[in-house]
């Protein structure tokens, strides 16, 4: 079972904070009184108190930062090539779609709404312990169609301009398949590149997005496990919007691409 880091962080922050508070209100005074009786200038605090006092502020800052501001994620698969590569370390804006409580994910403050074309991180509806990243294609109420590798939103064809073969000269640590073709897709006001593979069939279908849900797809259209397979993403599963790349390194290949550092995500 995959550990829930958010839950662990909440537990550790709460535990160290309560220990520090209980000591400050009750135990510290007793130690000082005993020290006076024994003519000790300053009694030594127990180790657990020292650690709790030192760790609590650090844990609290980390908890608040990653819960309400930004959280780092690592891209483990090629489903978002060419936008995101295996080994990309990205930053996710956690307040883009509202402030949510850690662990329970209850929305406290609504701030913004997901927009078509956003690259979103969410908890996989089939297994919420797993985080996924895809591009948001369909909003609540939309009708999404996919026929012969052509995307349609509400009956309108989404433009995609061919850019030629996606070659290995474009990336340092990824080896594209020889049949990978690059296209620039315009989804509303957002233009981004996608990949199609000539040797792969089209996963055709039509989907009506229900209220409170979203339809997502990977930019590597023929190599992505997305809404075409398992359905829609509930609003409460959204974690935030991917905004930038702060590192690229593929540990399996021992390869990195520093030119990607600092790149925005469109």
Image: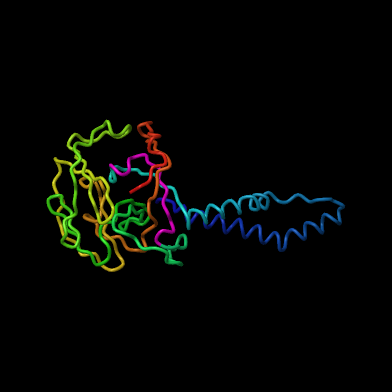
Q: How is the image coloured?
A: rainbow
Q: Please state which of residues 5 and 66 is positioned toward the viewer in this rendering.
A: 66
Residue 233 picture location, percent across and down: 30, 60
Majority secondary structure in the magenta region: loop
Label count reads: 0
Task: Residue lying at the far bottom in this picture: please name it.
Answer: 211
Is the residue 170 above or below the residue 95 in the image? above
Residue 114 picture location, percent across and down: 34, 60
Q: State which region is magenta.
A: 82-97
Residue for point 40% across, 43% down: 245
Is the residue 261 above or below the residue 16 in the image? above
Residue for point 22% across, 49% down: 185
Position of 247 with respect to 118 (left or right) is: right
Residue 231 picture location, percent across and down: 24, 59
Position of 206 with respect to 42 (left or right) is: left
Is the residue 170 above or below the residue 35 in the image? above
Position of 64 with respect to 190 (left or right) is: right
Magenta-colored stretch includes residue 83: yes
User: Residue 122 lies in what quarter of the image?
Assistant: bottom left
User: Residue 164 lies in what quarter of the image?
Assistant: top left
User: Residue 205 lies in what quarter of the image?
Assistant: bottom left
Position of 196 with respect to 216 (left or right) is: left
Residue 6 picture location, percent across and down: 47, 55
């Amino acid at each position: 079972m995959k550990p829930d880091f958010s839950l662990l962080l909440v537990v550790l922050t709460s535990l160290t904070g309560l220990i520090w508070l209980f000591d400050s209100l009750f135990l510290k005074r007793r130690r000082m009184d005993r020290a006076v009786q024994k003519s000790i200038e300053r009694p030594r605090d127990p180790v657990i108190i020292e650690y709790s006092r030192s760790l609590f502020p650090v844990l609290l800052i980390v908890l608040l930062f990653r819960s309400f501001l930004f959280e780092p994620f690592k891209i483990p698969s090629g489903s978002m090539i060419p936008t995101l590569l295996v080994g990309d370390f990205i930053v996710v804006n956690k307040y883009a779609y509202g402030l949510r409580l850690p662990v329970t994910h209850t929305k406290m403050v609504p701030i913004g709404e997901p927009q078509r074309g956003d690259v979103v991180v969410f908890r996989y509806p089939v297994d919420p312990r797993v985080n996924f990243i895809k591009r948001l294609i369909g909003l609540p109420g939309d009708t999404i169609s996919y026929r012969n590798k052509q995307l349609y939103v509400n009956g309108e064809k989404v433009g995609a301009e061919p850019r030629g073969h996606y070659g290995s000269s474009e990336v340092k640590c990824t080896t594209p398949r020889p049949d990978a073709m690059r296209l620039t897709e315009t989804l509303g006001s957002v233009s981004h590149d996608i990949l199609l593979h000539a040797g792969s069939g089209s996963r055709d279908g039509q989907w009506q997005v229900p209220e409170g849900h979203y339809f997502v797809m990977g930019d590597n259209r023929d190599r992505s496990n997305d809404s075409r397979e398992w359905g829609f993403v509930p609003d409460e599963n959204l974690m935030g919007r991917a905004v930038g790349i702060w590192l690229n390194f593929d540990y399996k290949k021992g390869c990195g691409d520093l030119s990607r550092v600092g790149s925005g995500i469109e």
